[in-house]
Image: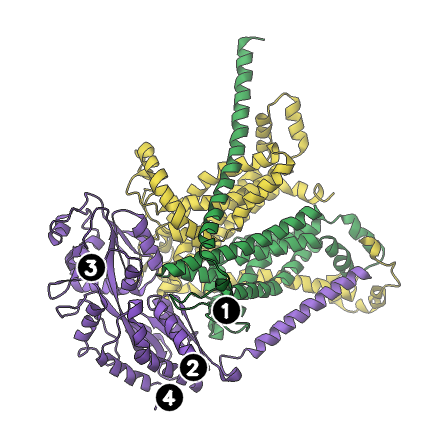
Amino acid sequence: MATNIEPKRPSPADEYGARARSFNWRRMLSATGSTGDAVFRLILLGSVLLILAIIAMMIYQMAANSALSLKQFGFGFLKGRTWNPIRGEFGALPFIYGTVVSSIIALIIAVPLSLGIAIFLVEQAPRRAARPIAFLVELLAAIPSVVYGLWGIFVLAPFLRVHVEPFLARWLGWLPLFQGTITGIGLFTGGVILAIMITPIISAVVRDVLAAVPVSQREAALALGATKWETTRVVLANAASGIAGAIILGLGRAIGETMAVTMVIGNRPQISASLFEPSYTIASVIANEFTEATEDLYLSALVEIGLILFLVTFIINGIAKLLVWSVTRGTSGTARAT
Amino acid sequence: MSAQVVRRKNSRRFVNTLMTSLAAACAFAVIIVLALILGYIAWQGLSSISLQFLLDTPKPVGEGGGIANAIVGTLFLLCLASLIGLPFGIAAGIYLAEFGDNLSGTIVRFVTDTLTGVPSIVVGVFVYTLIVLPQKHFSALAGGIALALIMIPIVARTTEEMLRLVPTSLREGALALGAPQWRVTMGVVLPAAASGIATGAMLAIARVSGETAPLLFTAFGSRFFNIYLDQPMSSLTVQIYNYAISPYDEWHAQAWAATLVLMALILTINMIVRFFTRKKF
Amino acid sequence: MPVSSNIKRGVVALLLTSLLLLAAACSGNQGGGTAGVVRLQGAGATFPNPLYQKWLSEYGKLNQSVRIDYQSIGSGGGIKQIQEQTVDFGASDAPMKDDDLKKASADILHIPTVLGAVVLTYNLSGVQQPLRFSPETIADIFLGKIKRWDDDKIKADNPGVALPNADVTVVHRSDGSGTSAVFTDYLQKVSPEWKEKVGTGTSPQWPVGIGGKGNEGVTGQIKQTPNTIGYVELAYAVQNKLPVSFIKNSSGSFIEPSLDAVTAAAAESVQTTPEDLRVSITNAAGAQAYPISSYTYILVYKEQRDAAKGKALADFLWWAIHDGEKFARDLQYAPLPAGIVKRAEAKINSITSGGKPLRQ
């Protein structure tokens, strides 16, 4: 491509250079002081500022719209167990509980699965097989949430109710987690569908992280007589913080997931030890009730819940990013570019 | 060799076989789940799809009707979102790749990454208060903006990644020839990364084409064909959702058929992406 | 420089496309009259949606110059959007509360369109004949006080029915819903305890049970889950051939939910219906009245900002409550009683624009 560039005639940048010196903004924006560069950089900077502005406006809008609820309930909002729009009592704890527990279930299922997939694809599978398999796994991430919800109601929930939940109740029924009426709709089903949805995300990041571990590590382990699995353990240990990042990234996604969870979790603001009981998540209550809230306080409480969701996903994604960078940063910039 | 060493070796071999086959089993279990989901959609969708369904607009219960306006609406919204989102996303990506190796770049990168994690329902609520309420009517424009907001951070980050793959020597070469920075970026670096950026853009489009939540209160929905920015516009996802919660079997069947169309659209985009990436890398 | 000119061409093409799009956008005006077409946007209750779609389709055939769109987003959504003036008309199963009316910027009229009923449906294997329920039993089930299907109170209403020895699982709506409002309005009339503990509204705090989104969600849960009971709209139950319960009305007879029993409930209360037509007809008197019945309303501003749109809206409403009613029965909605049609006519005739009535 570079060969297509003609040798430069006396550059317009030089022509304008003298004039540029009298204008500060150009020199601030461009090392060469060229007008073209300054304008170019200004446009790019504008786009970047737009992204920052979007975030700032989102936070402002949500804070402004939840002011009423913030004033009325204060920090008690986070501890309140009642959600009663008719009486005007609003507490977010059941939603926080439902969100956290369904996400934990999702992680318990998705993390071993994702690790297995990533190990298989990076360490074991022949390259020719690995690419199509990776593509298929990532296709799972391409299925829309609303479609997962439909499938969850008609296929997954009945399957879990008939085959999986009675099994769990029989063998693990001594735990309060697996007691209670089996309906197929509840925290457990919500967690399972979330697990399916976040597996491609976690496995893709873990794959990148494992691939970033230098080949020399593997060679060294193999040379010492380690088996394939023992070599993999060495690689995993080296990639630990990146894997943690991938898991937290999956957690962030699970927490914010809306449509699919809404359709299978039962939508009932309660805190119950049993995973078979219906529950409610933060994103679901917004989806279900934002359109319906006609009272100011009700709407304000919903927006405040949205604000909590926003801040939590923001923080979680931030932590995840830092962890993933800690492993891949060294390689992605240099090794991959060559 | 003592018996103990042999036993130890056997057990190591056993663990090795067990764990490697477990890893493979994980991959195949997930693929089976994918097959089950896609198979169910195909089964339910194919049994109720027809040419008429693809060419007709919605009709009252018992009179058939189709989703032509929703297909057009979804494509229109995707075009609109791309028109708004791609330039901003690519520009932000260029900034991050070419000028982002400093503190402000790191902050922007961080904020952009976290913006991709903002739940789409929050984006929908945001655009509703930002655009629909002041304008006093639902519009395709609001829907397009909502989708664009979801696209921008994805496009920005993939663009950055792709630009970073372009060897520094190429930039240095062009700069050494006396080209100003903007010429180098637009004329040399960008074309070199073009197919990668296009792939990122397609992935972003595929991602937003399945979004329901941000459209519910922005683009809304419509029974009619619409090509105007200031009118409500139908989309496949909202139509699926509306039919799914309706009380009629006929509309449920239409929801599955529309799901099939939506999945075909999304899979096609993914296939195109795959085709491009295989050629490039 | 071939490469950069390619880029330039690309940029120019992109700009041209966006200009074209913008041009298209500008020619789409604010709902007024390209080629004399008037556009009206409505939104709200999901319950009458199938009928409204039929009406809009039929009315569109008669009047090519009016394009009316209706989106079912829920009754609460209908009320909220008419308050925010993002739609030309809203729709709700429950009449707006006084507080909600005060929050609107101008007078809002309630035009009743048709009647519907909420029915109790269930999933019990081995039970053939329809179950019967007295009001107190229903309240106790939804309060969580009756926990087993073979509870004495259920047995008392259903002599000779082999009720299973199983837990009752209640299913309710998770989204804000006019159906929930009608059902809880009924429960608070028949149960003081319900009134005190729960009250009535589109999103009440249910003492027990699992939530499903929309009628679809509730039915899905009931169909999928054994030993469940829940409430859905009559049209829905009939379409899906769900078992429906007989409910004891205020005259003491068990009534099967039917269109005639719903109209009977409305007819009983024509005399007592207030001037603004906001009325609850749950637990109505009358031997044949089905007790969980209700009107569904279209909400419009009395004073229309745009005379052309206001006129089109008033004409459509007039057509709906006269010619439109004949489509109701096929779709499982009960037509308005004659007395209410007369009073709705007066409401439609009182719609004005610039202070002038739009219909003569």
- Disc 2 versus disc 4: distance between alpha carbons? 17 Å
Callout 1: residue from which chain? B
- Estimate the x, y position of residue C80 in percent, counting from the top left: 38, 70
What residue is pinned by disc 4?
Answer: C358
- Estimate the x, y position of residue C38 in percent, counting from the top left: 46, 81
Specify whether B32 is left or right of A338: left
Color used for chain A? yellow
Q: Which chain is purple?
A: C
SS for dot 2: loop
| Residue depth check, mark 4 versus mark 3: number of the one nearer the observer | 4
Evaluate whether residue C65 shows in this view.
Answer: yes
Ranked by sequence position, the earlier of labels 2 and 4 is 2
The reply to whether callout 2 and callout 1 are in contact (CB within 8 Å) is no
- Estimate the x, y position of residue B80 in percent, counting from the top left: 58, 66
| Tags 2 and 3 on a common chain | yes
Q: Which of the labelled discs sits on residue B233, or is there none?
A: 1
SS for dot 4: loop
Ranked by sequence position, the earlier of labels 2 and 3 is 2
Evaluate whether residue A87 shows in this view.
Answer: no
Picture quadrant where residue B189 is located = bottom right
Instruction: Tell me which colouring the rendered structure shows.
Output: by chain
What residue is pinned by disc 2?
Answer: C63
Q: Which chain is green?
A: B
